[in-house]
């Protein structure tokens, strides 16, 4: 699905909302997943997508057959915002445990990468961090009704940006999204890129979004951001965070 680049900020966010969280949301309150606006799905750019309200991803990405040389299905795709190249998969390096420290404008958040459960995703995430991809970017979406996520990882800040490649899903069997989960946003199956989301409260979603990390410190930061609310520009309970959340610096911390 192609995402039209819109010049106005509100237009870009409306497009992002349509992509991210809608399709795969399980409404905790019994309300329909589509609510009153385009659904959001965690995706390339958001958690739930166009027919719901979940984080979603961007255009023209397709599943790639896994091969011995490319077991993760890393393939070129558009858009290519702040392109850093396409990662290669090295099983030995990918297996090395690590944590990520997000130094944000609202405080520090530390995430343990699930390298055993999601080696392709954590390999991609490490690649982007090591190339400074997330430094200076900000989180463009906060949801405070029906699902409880903070979505980040788009260098354009519009919800429609991506790193110039996509890759296949993993770790979806029985996936759940309790508070402190870090998972990929997408635009449908096997459309992972750079966008991801934190759950700041237990969230019910279909198992469509690759979980690849767990918050080990900084839940208070996420909950403070959530408490400040958002501007409802996508839908009621779905918009731009009132507290600006910028990643001043994102770094890898080697775990032993």
Image: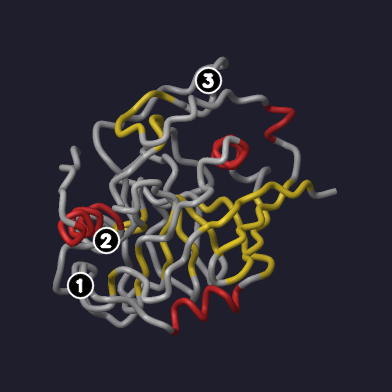
Give the residue pinned by disc 2.
Answer: 40
Q: Position of residue 190 (x, y in %)?
A: 38, 37
- The image's mark for residue 119 is none
Is 123 rendered above or below residue 14? Answer: above
Number of labels in the image equals 3
Q: Mark 1 or mark 3: name the one nearer the start of the chain.
A: 3
> What's the distance in space between the residues labelled 2 and 1, CA to CA?
10 Å
Furthest residue in direction right, as rendered: 256
Mark 1 in CB contact with mark 3 (< 8 angstroms): no
Is 252 rendered above or below residue 165? Answer: below
Badge 1 crowding class, 10 Å Cα cut-off, few under 14, some 14 to 19, many 20 or more, is some
Image depth: mark 2 or mark 1 in front: 1
Q: Mark 2 or mark 3: name the one nearer the start of the chain.
A: 2
Q: Mark 2 or mark 1: name the one nearer the start of the chain.
A: 2
Give the residue pinned by disc 1.
Answer: 235
Q: How is the image coloured?
A: secondary structure
The residue nearer to you, when weighing 172 against 83, is 83
Q: Position of residue 65 (x, y in %)?
A: 42, 22
In percent of the image, x 15 and y 57: which residue is there?
11
Give the residue pinned by disc 3.
Answer: 70
In percent of the image, x 59 and y 43: which residue is there?
118
Q: Position of residue 100 (x, y in %)?
A: 66, 53
Badge 3 crowding class, 10 Å Cα cut-off, few under 14, some 14 to 19, many 20 or more, is some
For label 3, the SS is: loop
For label 1, the SS is: loop
Mark 2 in CB contact with mark 1 (< 8 angstroms): yes
> What's the distance in space between the residues labelled 2 and 3, CA to CA?
30 Å
For label 2, the SS is: loop
């Amino acid at each position: 699905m192609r995402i039209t680049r819109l010049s106005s900020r509100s237009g870009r966010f409306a497009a992002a909302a349509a992509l991210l969280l809608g399709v795969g949301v399980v409404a905790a309150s019994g309300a329909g997943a589509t609510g009153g606006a385009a659904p959001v799905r965690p995706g390339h750019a958001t958690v739930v997508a166009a027919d719901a309200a979940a984080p979603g991803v961007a255009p023209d990405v397709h599943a790639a057959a896994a091969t011995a040389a490319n077991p993760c299905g890393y393939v070129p795709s558009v858009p290519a915002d702040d392109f850093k190249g396409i990662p290669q998969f090295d099983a030995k390096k990918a297996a090395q445990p690590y944590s990520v420290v997000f130094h944000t404008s609202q405080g520090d958040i530390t995430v343990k990468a699930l390298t055993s459960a999601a080696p392709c995703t954590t390999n991609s995430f490490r690649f982007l961090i090591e190339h400074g991809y997330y430094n200076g970017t900000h989180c463009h979406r906060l949801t405070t009704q029906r699902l409880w996520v903070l979505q980040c990882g788009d260098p354009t800040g519009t919800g429609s940006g991506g790193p110039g490649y996509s890759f296949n899903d993993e770790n979806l069997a029985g996936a759940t999204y309790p508070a402190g989960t870090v998972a990929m946003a997408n635009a449908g199956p096997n459309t992972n890129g750079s966008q991801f989301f934190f759950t700041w409260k237990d969230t019910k979603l279909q198992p469509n979004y690759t979980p690849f990390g767990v918050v080990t410190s900084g839940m208070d930061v996420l909950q403070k951001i959530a408490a400040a609310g958002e501007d409802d520009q996508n839908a009621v309970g779905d918009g731009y965070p009132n507290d600006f959340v910028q990643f001043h610096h994102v770094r890898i911390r080697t775990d032993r």
